[in-house]
Image: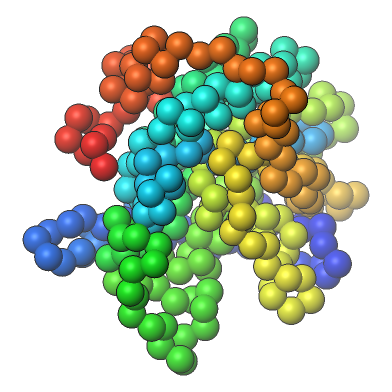
Amino acid sequence: QKLRVVSPTARVASPPPIRVTPVRDIGAKVRPVGRVVSPEPINGRVAPCKTVEVWFVRHGETVANASRITQGQQPGRLTRTGALQAAALGERLQRDHDVSPFDVVLCSDLLRCRQTCHLATKGFCHEPKVARTDPLLRERAVGVYEGLAHDAPRKPRPPHVPPRKHRVEGGESWDDVNRRARKLLSRLGSTFVATKDDSRDRLRVLCVTHGGFIMEAMNAATGADGCTVPFCSNGAWNTSVWKVELTRNDKGKLCCRVVGANDASHLDSGSPRAELDLRDDAVLACAGVSADKWWAADDPVSATG
């Protein structure tokens, strides 16, 4: 199913198969451990709708964020501030969910997003019909630079390689992440956007993800090419909300447009203060004790990163 982007230039995004290369630390070297193939199609228990409203939400502040450490696809762990940010997001999402429920909740399988998703959705009165992790939502893999300080020396990019196509050893390029974002949007559209006029009006999807992925999702939604349509900057605030609408045009083609960006109003000083007992909620979630839940944390060894 092709995705038509609503932008100043008519562009059709037909995403190729995903090619994501995670890494494993083997001694002093970082080597690929194989390719992550696209997960199974999203369960279609939800009836298609005329409009699908996708909410992309960035995770809360992590220890690495506060220390200005490059995380990439490392698990990450929320700080106390990050847990409170996620709780404040949860207050907002709960109000929205009570009015118009989130039928689908997708979350990056990295720990920091699962912690955020747990704290932000635990107050939902109605269980989502689809709730699962999805590796398509991962942050950009930066290979040998993961775990290094932001200002650590780095190998210069070869002059003949365009910035968006540059891959560090064991990592991805921004174009690779953009293909993942297009793949996700196309999948959501083909699964949940109705082809008939008698369908219900609107469906909501919540995606808990990362700043780099959100940037590329916005680039995919606007058809950014760096010339006629500028690329979005990587500036998503922690727990900020970005909204994209998926519909079909008169010819039945999938269309995509951005309707909200970088909204973190739930963190404003004037917003209601979120109530969160860190001993009962954030600490337990960080410890991975909710093993029976789909957002359960990694095993103790890998969860310490």
Q: Which part of the image, by quadrant, shows the C terminus?
A: top left
> 162 or 221: which is nearer to us?
162
Is residue 116 among what the camera can see? Answer: no
Residue occupying the far front of the picture: 269
Total label count?
0
Q: Which colour scheme is used?
A: rainbow
Where is residue 146 drawn, in percent x and y? 31, 58
Where is residue 142 drawn, in percent x and y? 37, 63
Is residue 137 among what the camera can see? Answer: yes
Q: Residue at x 66, y 22 (%)?
A: 93
Q: Residue at x 53, y 74 (%)?
A: 164
| 272 over 252 or under it: above or below | above
| 281 over 104 or under it: above or below | above
| 81 over 164 or under it: above or below | above
Q: Which residue is drawn at 52% across and 42% down?
A: 209
> 160 or 285: which is nearer to us?
285
Where is residue 189 drawn, in percent x and y? 68, 43
Where is residue 56 drawn, in percent x and y? 62, 40
| 78 over 225 or under it: above or below | above
Residue occupying the far left of the picture: 27
Does residue 181 appear left or right of residue 154 in this picture?
A: right
Residue occupying the far right of the picture: 250
Does residue 132 appear left or right of residue 233 in this picture?
A: left
Q: Residue at x 64, y 18 (%)?
A: 273
